[in-house]
Image (tube, grey):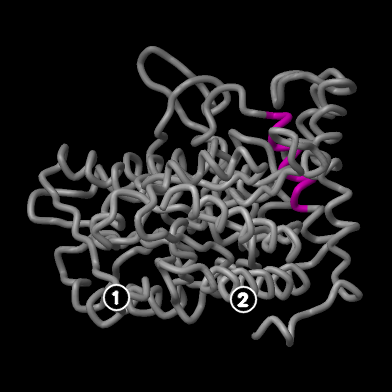
């Protein structure tokens, strides 16, 4: 969709949306804030902030451990977030949704509870060059302990997974495939349904890192056909320290607990412990109760806006930003897949990413510089780092214009 064909503000009232996000009204270094670091963490609407505050003001108590009124209210709110999340991703059962601190913990849970007990020398785990470190390092750790190896499928210069190569690498030694839904650096959207179909043909379970997908598009784990789906709350309007792992019931039933402690047991004896059923056998200790109350409120906010409107507005912003950035001499964009979300990584000839980010910050513009926890991807493009502008549905064309003006100033200073 070209910018001229975009949905207008008469359909999507971005000014009204922005009014829901208190932090967007602040200034930085005396300049109006332009927040383009949404792939790192999203801003939070007032409804999420208030939900967290209300929990601490009105019902602060531990969950599932008391019969008093506060404990029951806290438990209801906490478990209500699980219900909302299960509906949000179309999980067949709420009990298949394990509440975690985020994608990193979710992937480690699968690595140590599912993969490690099954891996042996000669086995391998297949991932891709575009993965975040959270979808690489846990597999390397369990591979080292088991004698297995980690393989990475290649991408092309456009930042797209070379599917035929990925499928060729699904050899009998592969015991688990692990793929990002959306690249945090390139914005590339991987065809998960097609990948899952090929994995199923070979009897290989598929784990999907959904951290960068859920903020931008609806997700139906049943339609996708994967076996594990990991997500992070703080990238989708919710508080930090929240997230989840969805997995098929038959896999979860067969997986031992990853953490031990309170709340994940039926009975503890010194001659043996009996564990609770799913999901609680994976949720030892006191959770981030208020955070998950906030996650529930974040899901409510997404539902009130609607992903159809969100996707249309963000694709408009992506097209417009890409067009404007191409006006800047010497600017190279990394990742130009046909299907991508509003993430643009780039460099300008002769300028270092960190220097650019520092100077942009002085003009009130927040972007990310560095390797973005994706060293193998940086090595593929033979660069140490990039500058990344990641957009959300509360961003505007006017902010993009201000960003481009600031970039031209920065370029002039650094040349």
- In-image side of 5 versus 39 (left or right): right
Please tell me whether mark 1 sits on a helix, a strand or a loop. Answer: loop
- Is the residue 150 above or below the residue 291 in the image? below
Q: CA distance from mark 1 to mark 2?
A: 21 Å
Res. 156 mark: 1
Q: Residue at x 26, y 54 (%)?
A: 376
In the rendered image, residue 411 lying in the magenta stretch gets the answer no
Task: Say which of 35 and 228 sits in front.
Answer: 35
Task: Say which of 147 and 399 sits in front.
Answer: 399
Give the crowd class for mark 1: few <14, some 14-19, many >=20 residues within 10 Å.
few
User: Main SS of the magenta segment?
Assistant: helix
In the rendered image, residue 292 lying in the magenta stretch gets the answer yes
Q: Position of residue 265 (x, y in %)?
A: 52, 26
Q: Which residues are magenta?
A: 289-299
Task: Say which of 191 and 378 sits in front.
Answer: 378
Find residue 112 and report its image quarter.
top left
Mark 2 — residue? Answer: 319
- In-image side of 57 versus 81 (left or right): right
Find residue 124 and report its image quarter.
bottom left
Q: Position of residue 352 (x, y in %)?
A: 38, 47
Q: Residue at x 65, y 46 (%)?
A: 42
């Amino acid at each position: 969709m070209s910018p001229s064909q975009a949905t207008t503000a008469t359909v999507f009232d971005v000014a009204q949306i922005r009014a829901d996000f208190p932090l967007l009204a602040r200034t930085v270094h005396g300049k109006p804030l332009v927040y383009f670091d949404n792939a790192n963490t999203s801003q939070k609407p007032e409804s999420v902030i208030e939900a967290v505050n209300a929990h601490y003001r009105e019902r602060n108590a531990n969950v599932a451990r008391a019969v008093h009124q506060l404990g029951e209210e806290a438990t209801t709110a906490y478990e209500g977030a699980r219900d909302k999340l299960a509906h949000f991703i179309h999980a067949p059962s709420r009990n298949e949704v394990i509440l975690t601190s985020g994608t990193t913990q979710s992937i480690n849970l699968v690595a140590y509870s599912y993969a490690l007990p099954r891996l042996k020398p000669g086995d391998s785990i297949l991932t891709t060059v575009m993965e975040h470190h959270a979808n690489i390092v846990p597999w390397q750790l369990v591979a080292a302990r088991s004698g297995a190896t980690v393989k990475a499928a290649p991408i092309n210069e456009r930042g797209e997974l070379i599917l035929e190569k990925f499928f060729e690498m699904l050899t009998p030694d592969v015991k688990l495939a692990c793929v990002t839904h959306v690249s945090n650096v390139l914005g590339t959207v991987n065809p998960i349904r097609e990948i899952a179909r090929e994995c199923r043909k070979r009897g290989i379970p598929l784990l999907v890192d959904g951290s960068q997908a859920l903020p931008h598009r609806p997700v139906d784990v049943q339609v996708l056909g994967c076996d594990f789906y990991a997500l992070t709350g703080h990238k989708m309007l919710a508080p930090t320290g929240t997230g989840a792992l969805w997995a098929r019931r038959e896999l979860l039933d067969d997986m031992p607990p990853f953490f031990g402690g309170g709340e994940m047991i039926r009975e503890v004896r010194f001659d043996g412990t009996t564990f609770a059923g799913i999901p609680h056998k994976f949720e030892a200790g006191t959770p981030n109760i208020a955070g998950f109350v906030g996650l529930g409120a974040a899901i409510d906010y997404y539902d009130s806006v609607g992903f159809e409107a969100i996707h249309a507005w963000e694709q408009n912003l992506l097209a417009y930003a890409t067009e404007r950035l191409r006006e800047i001499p010497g600017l190279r964009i990394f990742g130009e897949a046909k299907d991508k979300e509003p993430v643009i990584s780039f460099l300008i000839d002769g300028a270092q990413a960190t220097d650019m980010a520092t100077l942009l910050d002085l003009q009130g513009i927040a972007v990310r510089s560095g390797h973005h926890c994706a060293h193998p991807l940086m090595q593929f493009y033979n660069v140490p780092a990039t500058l990344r502008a990641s957009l959300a549905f509360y961003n505007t064309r006017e902010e993009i214009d201000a960003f481009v003006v600031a970039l031209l100033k920065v370029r002039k200073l650094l040349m």
